[in-house]
Amino acid sequence: MIKNKTDYIFYRESDRIISGRNKKTFFDGIKLFFIPDSISDFMTLLRTVEYYENCSKNILDKIKSKYFKHKFRKKSLQLGFSIPPNVFGPGLFIPHYGTIVINSKATVGANCVLHTSTCITAKDYIEMGNNVYISTGAIIAGNLKINDNVTIGANSLLNKSFNETDVLLAGSPATIIKKRKAWYLEDGVQYENRVNEIMELKKKLYSH
């Protein structure tokens, strides 16, 4: 959860790095004016809403919080995303447009990949670890806990807890299909490099 300005910077940069987006230059700003990157805009607004919601200290901050919440709701409706603040850790990667519905009682760790047509819902809680990969059409429902480095297969129904790490879960209801390393180790060296870059950024920002 974002608790201060350093966290805000880390979360925003982690989201940018994991998605493979470069830092914006002046010319990028001109290009994006004509061809917006709506998912990038959504991610920026999500983290900004989280920052002001968690860290507002005065009346001006509260006014800014209301303003950014309004923009965030509009962008959410445009994209079909129903993702509440303070659910996902740093390094959230949403590759595509499409319907996503997340319950506010869920908590998900760092470096999560979240595909379209997915739903995470719970009566009381859902806790998911770091480096979770949620494939298209997956439904995660009920009070449950999932460990680190878990991949959830497409169109799966996950409705119970799993303590294992480094596994592929799939089916309806989901079961362990096989051992599988964290998604960023399986899906190409460029993703491993991105996660390593995030780890170096974390050391740099929090070393003081």
Image (tube, rainbow, N blue to C red):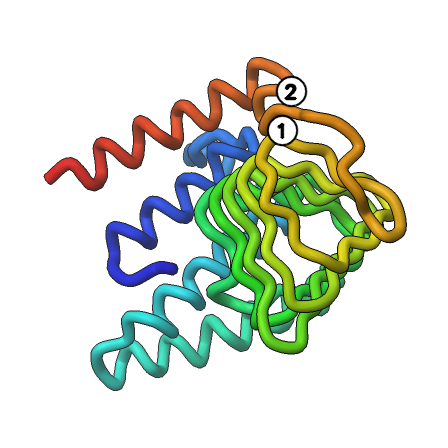
Residue 36 in sight from this viewpoint: no
The answer to which of 69 and 119 lies nearer the viewer is: 119
Q: Which mark is residue 4?
A: none
* Relative height, residue 203 to residue 138 (above, below): above
For the C terminus, give its image quadrant: top left
Q: Residue at x 68, y 40 (%)?
A: 95
Image location of residue 207, percent across then percent down: 15, 36
The answer to which of 140 and 15 lies nearer the viewer is: 140
Does 82 sit left or right of 26 as displayed?
Answer: right
Determine whether the residue tagged by mark 1 lies in a helix, strand or loop: helix
Q: Which mark is residue 183?
A: 1
Determine whether the residue tagged by mark 2 lies in a helix, strand or loop: helix
In the image, what residue type sits under mark 1? Trp
Image location of residue 54, percent across then percent down: 34, 71
Q: Residues within 10 Å of mark 2 (few under 14, many from 20)?
A: few
Q: Residue furthest left?
A: 208
Residues at circles 1 and 2 in contact by the CB criterion of under 8 Å: yes
In the image, what residue type sits under mark 2? Glu
Q: Residues within 10 Å of mark 1 (few under 14, many from 20)?
A: many
Q: Which mark is residue 186?
A: 2
Give the tally of numbered discs: 2
Q: Quadrant of residue 78?
A: bottom right
Does 127 sit left or right of 187 as displayed?
Answer: left
Q: Quadrant of residue 55?
A: bottom left
Image location of residue 48, percent across then percent down: 42, 62
Q: How far apart are labels 1 and 2 at the CA level?
A: 5 Å
